[in-house]
Image (cartoon, rainbow, N blue to C red):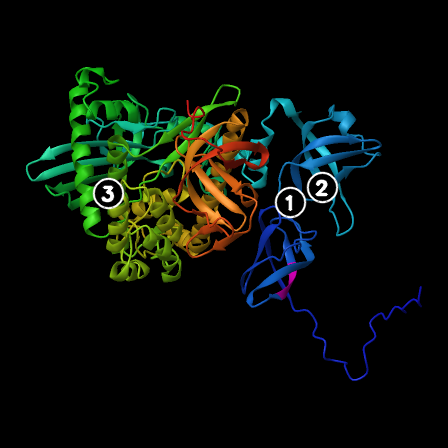
């Protein structure tokens, strides 16, 4: 068997003392994005965490990490110590493991075990049974080789009455739940007193006789923008009225501080997690028809070509004449409905119809003017899973731009840009919406595929790589209506940088705007509230007030927080849609559908279905019993024996082979002998 080698402990060979370097530890905040994937934010920068390097850390913890080389790539971090904990409670599912109890976290990022010790009577005291969802408080944190200990604070309810897949997404993104009692108390005490606001504010204009109205999705509950328009002798006048949230929500008040923390409303597949208490977003600040409401308004004059010649902003009082939805406005514009059918008073209907026609005309002019200055218009589709009253998916609605959505969007763009120019000209600190030019490296990666599609070669390809917006416009225009349209749009959209909020104006690349901000949704986005406060301070001549100086001091961090919260909200909304899409397709296993390859990786193809925009994976093993070579530049997989190639943009027929709703996954395989794919999921 041989002799057992002695334990060498910390002994070193003679002459080697001092040559082994001690680990240099950095302190930072651990951010876990998804199970096993994390980064550490340190004063020296953000460092990705190595595989298995999270150890006993949990998202939000302050940790000490060591750095290790990653074979020529950027360094990777590994958690060595937890300095302080961020998570104290979590939601989970209770399991009986006599004599212990166990709580399995709904947050998929928490991959540790937590037990309720036999001596803790919490489960019996609260009537917690097998499978119940509970709120657990951590009493002992897990170590590298030990489980954690929790006690149960609250029984939320039985699993059967909760949508655990959606609840898991909410927990995994650490989305906010109930509002603090102080914020609710403040909101409940607010009253709408338009007469008093008009009497006490010399800047506020009474525009209740102006014909304005709201246009929103059919299922909208909060209405924060109203529009109106008319022709003038030299062009057009457009009114945009936005709910005056900051009139009711003072800086650093309980509601304001909670709104800062939330950053934005989160629109999940089955619910909305609002930024403001319901009393404000669905009542006091909602521009409901036929009631008086306070607004911050922008009135803009445009010439006959759609160029803005003048813009004025001021606080107002308005009364919306009608609550329209996009379908109604589109029916009017397309001649499928008359003014008499609009949901408003008969004597007001002709004015509303005329204003919609003017806004439609202005929208067409503005789209042309923005294109002339280099704005890039990506034609995208948005899929929304329809649910019944029990949360069961029944189908998919795919939304595209229409004339009605465009006229509202263009009115909001003009208002946002006009306010941004006012603030930028005054060099006022505010939350500007900034979109940087994409990097040449990202754009260069699109060229091999665009070249194969015949969309970008030679000089045009060079211009695309340089980020020339007119070149990107040309590629998208050439692709429109062709088989490569979806792929070209996807590739160029993915190459764009994400727009962020910054305390200084740096322009907006995709819009071709020298200055831009978000002003039009203060009910659901906190940066809009920052902009409202900055604009009001300019109008009142108190740009150097104590409040504005206080805002300016923390503005950089506030902008970063708002950008982060927006990204989190988008991710959570997307993941809940995937959960319900996978649930929907669970009843379509074995059926075939037509689609297009939208992504190629070494491990398979991502296919987006035509009718529903559902995305699933065809694993490489399902493509055939051969070796497939992966071409990263051309985004293709080619069978070495058959020579058959699978590429981005390729049309395919696939069969649903399985789903995993908890992870929002749909699995596909190439359809065998399917000359025409069937599609029932969208119905």
Q: Quadrant of residue 160?
A: top right
Classify 10 Å Cα crowding around label 3: few (below 14), some (14-19), many (20 and above): many
By secondary structure, the bulk of the magenta-drawn segment is best described as: strand
527 sits left or right of 35 in the view? left
Real-space CA distance between mark 2 and mark 1, rounded to the nearest whole angstrom: 8 Å
215 sits left or right of 387 in the view? left
Task: Give the residue at mark 2.
Answer: 138
**Label 1 with label 3: CB-CB less than 8 Å:** no
Real-space CA distance between mark 1 and mark 3, rounded to the nearest whole angstrom: 43 Å
Task: Give the residue at mark 3.
Answer: 414
Residue 62 percent across, percent down from the top left: 63, 55
**Helix, strand or loop under label 2:** strand
Real-space CA distance between mark 3 and mark 2, rounded to the nearest whole angstrom: 50 Å
3 or 2: tag closer to the N-terminus: 2
As drawn, the label of residue 210 is none
Which residue, as the protein is rendered here, is positioned at the far front? 641
Residue 121 percent across, percent down from the top left: 80, 30
Closer-to-camera residue (1/350): 1
**Label 2 with label 1: CB-CB less than 8 Å:** yes
Question: Does the magenta run of residues contain 67?
Answer: yes
Residue 159 percent across, percent down from the top left: 65, 25
Q: Quadrant of residue 503?
A: bottom left
Query: Where does the magenta region start and end?
Result: 64-68
Q: Is residue 426 above or below residue 280?
A: below
Classify 10 Å Cα crowding around label 2: few (below 14), some (14-19), many (20 and above): some
Residue 50 percent across, percent down from the top left: 62, 58
Closer-to-camera residue (319/305): 305
Q: Is residue 528 visible?
A: yes
2 or 1: tag closer to the N-terminus: 1
As drawn, the label of residue 87 is 1
């Amino acid at each position: 068997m041989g002799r057992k080698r002695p334990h060498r402990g910390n002994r070193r060979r003679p002459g080697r003392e001092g040559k082994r370097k001690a680990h240099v530890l950095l302190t930072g905040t651990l951010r876990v994005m998804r199970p096993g994937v994390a980064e550490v934010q340190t004063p020296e920068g953000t460092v990705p965490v190595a595989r298995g390097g999270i150890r006993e850390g949990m998202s939000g913890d302050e940790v000490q990490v060591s750095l290790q080389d990653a074979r020529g790539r950027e360094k990777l971090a590994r958690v060595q110590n937890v300095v302080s904990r961020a998570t104290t409670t979590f939601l989970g599912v209770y399991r009986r493991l006599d004599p212990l109890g166990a709580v399995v976290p709904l947050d998929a990022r928490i991959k540790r075990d937590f037990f309720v010790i036999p001596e803790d009577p919490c489960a019996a005291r609260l009537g917690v049974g097998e499978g119940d969802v509970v709120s657990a408080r951590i009493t002992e944190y897990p170590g590298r080789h030990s489980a954690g200990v929790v006690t149960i604070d609250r029984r939320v309810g039985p699993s059967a009455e909760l949508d655990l897949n959606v609840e898991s997404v909410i927990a995994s993104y650490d989305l906010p739940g109930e509002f603090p009692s102080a914020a609710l108390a403040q909101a409940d005490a607010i009253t709408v007193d338009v007469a008093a606001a008009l009497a006490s504010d010399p800047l506020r204009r009474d525009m209740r006789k102006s014909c304005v109205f709201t246009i929103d999705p059919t299922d909208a509950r909060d209405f924060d923008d109203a529009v109106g328009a008319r022709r003038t002798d030299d062009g057009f006048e457009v009114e945009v009225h936005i709910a005056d949230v900051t009139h009711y929500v003072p800086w650093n008040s309980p509601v304001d501080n909670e709104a800062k923390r939330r950053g934005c409303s989160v629109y999940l597949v089955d619910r909305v997690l609002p930024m403001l208490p319901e009393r404000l977003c669905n009542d006091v600040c909602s521009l409901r028809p036929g009631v008086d409401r306070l607004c911050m308004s922008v009135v803009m004059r445009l010439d006959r070509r759609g160029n803005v010649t003048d813009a004025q902003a001021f606080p107002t009082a308005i009364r919306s004449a009608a609550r329209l939805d996009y379908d109604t406005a589109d029916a009017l514009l397309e001649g499928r409905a008359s003014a008499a059918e609009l949901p408003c008073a008969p004597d007001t209907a002709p004015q509303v119809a005329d204003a919609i026609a003017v806004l439609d005309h202005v929208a067409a002019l503005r789209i042309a003017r923005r294109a002339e200055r280099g704005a890039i218009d990506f034609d995208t589709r948005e899929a929304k899973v329809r649910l019944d009253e029990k949360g069961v998916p029944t189908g998919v609605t795919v939304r595209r731009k229409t004339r009605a959505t465009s006229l509202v969007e263009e009115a909001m763009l003009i208002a946002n840009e006009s306010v941004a120019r006012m603030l930028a000209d005054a060099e006022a600190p505010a939350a500007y919406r900034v979109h940087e030019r994409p990097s040449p490296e990202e754009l260069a990666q699109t060229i091999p595929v665009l070249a194969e599609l015949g969309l970008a070669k030679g000089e045009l390809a060079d211009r695309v790589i340089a980020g020339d917006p007119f070149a990107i416009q040309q590629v998208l225009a050439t692709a429109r209506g062709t088989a490569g349209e979806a792929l070209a749009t996807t590739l160029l959209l993915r190459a764009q940088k994400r727009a962020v909020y910054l305390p200084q104006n740096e322009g907006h690349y995709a819009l071709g705007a020298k200055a831009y901000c978000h002003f039009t949704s203060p009910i659901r986005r906190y940066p809009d509230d920052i902009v409202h406060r900055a604009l009001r301070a300019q109008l009142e001549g108190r740009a150097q007030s104590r409040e504005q100086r206080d805002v300016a001091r923390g503005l950089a961090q506030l902008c970063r927080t708002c950008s982060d919260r927006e990204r989190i909200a988008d991710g959570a909304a997307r993941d809940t849609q995937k959960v319900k899409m996978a649930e929907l397709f669970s009843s379509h296993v074995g059926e075939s559908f037509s689609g297009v390859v939208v992504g190629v990786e070494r491990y398979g193809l991502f296919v987006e279905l035509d009718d529903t925009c559902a995305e699933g994976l065809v694993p490489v093993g399902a493509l055939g019993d051969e070796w497939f070579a992966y071409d990263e530049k051309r985004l293709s997989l080619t069978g070495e024996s058959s020579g058959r190639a699978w590429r981005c943009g390729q049309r395919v027929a696939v069969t649903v082979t399985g789903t995993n709703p908890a992870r929002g996954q749909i699995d596909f395989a190439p359809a065998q002998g399917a000359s025409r794919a069937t599609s029932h999921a969208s119905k």
